[in-house]
Image (spheres, rainbow, N blue to C red):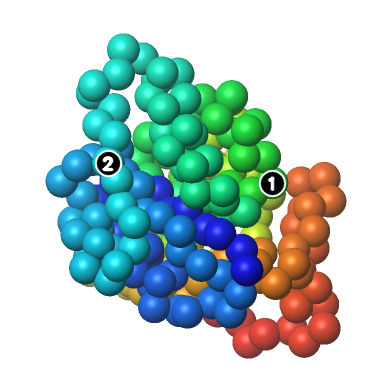
Amino acid sequence: MKNIVILISGRGSNMQALVEANIPDARIAAVLSNNPQAAGLAWAAERGIATAALNHRDFPDRAAFDRAMADKIDAHAPDLVVLAGFMRILTPEFCRHYENRLINIHPSLLPAFTGLHTHQRALDEGCRIAGCTVHFATAELDNGPIIAQAAVPVLDGDDADTLAARVLAAEHQIFPQAVADFVSGSLKIVGKRVINARRRQAPPALH
Ligand code: GAR
């Protein structure tokens, strides 16, 4: 059984998709947040999952917050830490501590559009395809080895909200699958690439 700790900052729909996927051999040990008001915390608590919030505003600096968050996480002996809409930049020390066991979901087709406002930026650039990426998180923002991506069309008439909704539906597909692949031991990091034993055996349908 692999222990998973999920970090959220808000709504938590990716966290919900992960919980509802009931991944074999995975246990959601805790859902933690930097935002005590995060709606996802209440959702998780209602389902009997351990929850806690550490308000980053209560800490003098980023490093102090990250150290306190790591202590909270490590109390749950995690095999995997998942960033599911966790909207804080993490220190290199934090990322190194969880090296190769820290996974992030990002709402763009990386390496395009790291950071914030990905959907508006994709629209502003005239992209005809947008999407999302699940990747191992490293000290370099939104730049770790890519586990999975899904593409969606950009439709004429889209605004950032309609595009975000289409991308989010794709996030809910690839995120639980990527975590399941980690838990089953299918993922191997080779340099910047992730080799996925499941995909080698039977190529899935295109997302
Ligand atoms: C998701 O779209 C996720 O990809 C994005 O925040 C949203 C959270 O939604 N994450 C980032 O932008 C990280 N840089 P959720 O709380 O409903 O899962």
* Residue at screen point 25% across, 62% down: 45
> For mark 1, does the 10 Å Cα neighbourhood hold few (<14), some (14 to 19), or many (20 or more) residues?
some
Give the structural element (helix, strand or loop) at label 1: loop
Q: Is residue 109 above or below residue 172?
A: above
Label 1, label 2: how far apart the Cα atoms are:
24 Å
Quadrant location of the C terminus in the rendered image:
bottom right
* Residue at screen point 56% across, 48% down: 77
Q: Position of residue 137 (x, y in %)?
A: 58, 43
Q: Position of residue 11 (x, y in %)?
A: 23, 57
* Residue at screen point 46% across, 59% down: 29
Q: Is residue 206 above or below residue 85?
A: below
Give the structural element (helix, strand or loop) at label 2: strand
Q: Which residue is mark 1?
A: 100
Q: Is residue 82 left or right of residue 38?
A: right
The three-letter code of the residue at mark 1 reads Asn
* Residue at screen point 80% across, 73% down: 197
Q: Quadrant of residue 33?
A: top left
> For mark 2, does the 10 Å Cα neighbourhood hold few (<14), some (14 to 19), or many (20 or more) residues?
some
Q: Which residue is mark 2?
A: 53
Instruction: Between label 1 and label 2, give the one nearer the viewer.
Output: 2
Q: Nearer the viewer, residue 175 or 184?
A: 184
Mark 1 touches mark 2? (CB < 8 Å): no
